[in-house]
């Protein structure tokens, strides 16, 4: 009997030691880092924080996501590679900051005559589902978004194409081609450096959605906004997670995150329009002027930018990518 009791005691203790680590693994939350280049107060950072909190809530605290805003973990142009290398688990940034890395997806950045952020954001996600571009194979895409109409903000008034000729305009990614096509001089520069460059006169204007006048405080250093919708563009943003980290998540948690992602596509697109509206009110309150182009002048801007679309198609043909199909898909969906 004593021998039997000893055997049972040993078995019980062995079972306890065997199961304790498993129990700990289940109760300890999965901690993920999230790198964002927007400053902490920016509404895109705030909305990303709400995304993280919603995932924590729906997973009952099993997933905790810590956000590093302002490019403190990885700068904007290093964010994607930072996710691939595991410097951050999750990252949000602009595809155009790493030109050539997402060739087919540059279709979103073309001057297609965007009218809203929600249409641009819906379009980029529809495009991704339709074409499943291999250029994102290094990561797991959570969701994509794109800002509202990219238009012109300057220190001097621009009423027509001739007023823009020779003007130094901050631009990034494919918007640099838009500036060139319209007769300006593109100056490559990240968002975070633009305020000082405008203030010091290093550049005389910038291309961006009107929300930048408030979100990045450009309204303090420019005086005019030209509603150049004939050549308005957008910029594609990615929200991606390290592929190994994603594959290591339980299937149930993956499904929860995917559900939140779908909701945040609409929330983010809607946010772009809300902050565009707020940016317009902000610049007008400062006494700045918004210039609306006539239908005829808008068509002039559209014609000037049209060769960029042809260049894209030809470039994709050279890379054996379906650029013509992607462009047609985007134009038809925008209509």
Image (tube, rainbow, N blue to C red):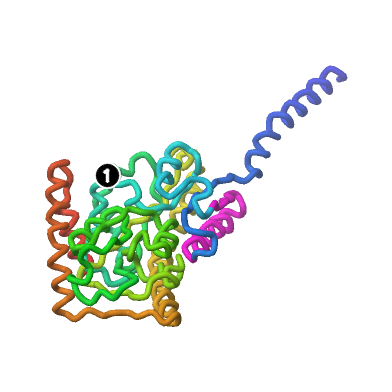
Q: Quadrant of the N terminus?
A: top right
Q: Tell me where residue 86 appears, x and y as whole percent.
A: 48, 38
Task: Name which residue lies at 32% across and 52% down.
Answer: 96
Q: As drawn, is 106 to the left or to the right of 208?
A: left
Q: Is residue 262 visible?
A: no
Q: So how many labels did they put on this image?
A: 1
Q: Tell me where residue 330 appears, x and y as whole percent.
A: 21, 61
Dominant secondary structure of the residues highlighted in magenta in the image: helix
For residue 266, what is the image quadrant? Answer: bottom left
Q: In this view, does 212 lie above or below 14?
A: below
Task: Name which residue lies at 23% across and 49% down.
Answer: 104
Q: Can residue 100 be seen in this view?
A: yes
Instruction: Give the labeled residue for mark 1.
Output: 100
Q: Tell me where residue 44 appears, x and y as whole percent.
A: 47, 63
For the residue pair 172 and 130, the one nearer the viewer reads as 172
- In the rendered image, the residue lying farthest to the top is 3
Residues drawn in magenta: 43-68
For the residue pair 4 and 309, the one nearer the viewer reads as 309
For residue 213, what is the image quadrant? Answer: bottom left
Q: Tell me where residue 38 appears, x and y as whole percent.
A: 47, 58
Q: Quadrant of the C terminus?
A: bottom left
């Amino acid at each position: 009997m004593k021998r039997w009791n000893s055997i049972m005691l040993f078995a019980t203790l062995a079972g306890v030691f065997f199961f304790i680590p498993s129990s700990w693994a289940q109760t300890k939350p999965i901690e993920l880092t999230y790198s964002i280049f927007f400053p902490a107060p920016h509404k895109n950072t705030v909305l990303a924080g709400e995304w993280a909190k919603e995932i924590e809530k729906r997973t009952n605290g099993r997933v905790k996501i810590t956000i590093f805003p302002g490019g403190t973990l990885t700068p904007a142009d290093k964010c994607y590679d930072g996710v691939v290398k595991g410097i951050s688990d999750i990252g949000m940034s602009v595809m155009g900051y790493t030109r050539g890395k997402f060739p087919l997806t540059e279709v979103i950045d073309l001057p297609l005559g965007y009218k809203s952020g929600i249409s641009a954001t819906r379009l980029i996600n529809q495009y991704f589902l339709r074409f499943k571009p291999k250029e994102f194979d290094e990561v797991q895409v959570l969701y994509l978004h794109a800002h509202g109409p990219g238009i012109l903000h300057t220190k001097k008034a621009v009423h027509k194409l001739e007023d823009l000729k020779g003007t130094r305009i901050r631009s990034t990614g494919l918007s640099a081609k838009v500036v060139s096509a319209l007769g300006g001089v593109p100056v490559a520069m990240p968002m975070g450096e633009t305020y000082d460059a405008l203030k010091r006169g290093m550049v005389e204007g910038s291309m961006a959605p009107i929300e930048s006048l408030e979100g990045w405080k450009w309204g303090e250093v420019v005086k005019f906004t030209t509603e150049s919708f004939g050549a308005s563009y957008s910029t594609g943003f990615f929200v991606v997670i390290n592929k190994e980290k994603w594959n290591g998540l339980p299937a149930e948690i993956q499904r929860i995150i995917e559900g939140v992602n779908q909701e945040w596509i609409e929330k983010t697109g809607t946010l772009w329009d809300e902050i565009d509206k707020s940016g317009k009110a902000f610049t007008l309150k400062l006494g700045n002027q918004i210039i609306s182009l006539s239908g005829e002048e808008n068509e002039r801007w559209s014609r000037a930018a049209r060769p960029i679309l042809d260049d894209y198609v030809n470039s994709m043909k050279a890379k054996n990518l379906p650029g013509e199909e992607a462009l047609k898909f985007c134009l038809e969906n925008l209509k």
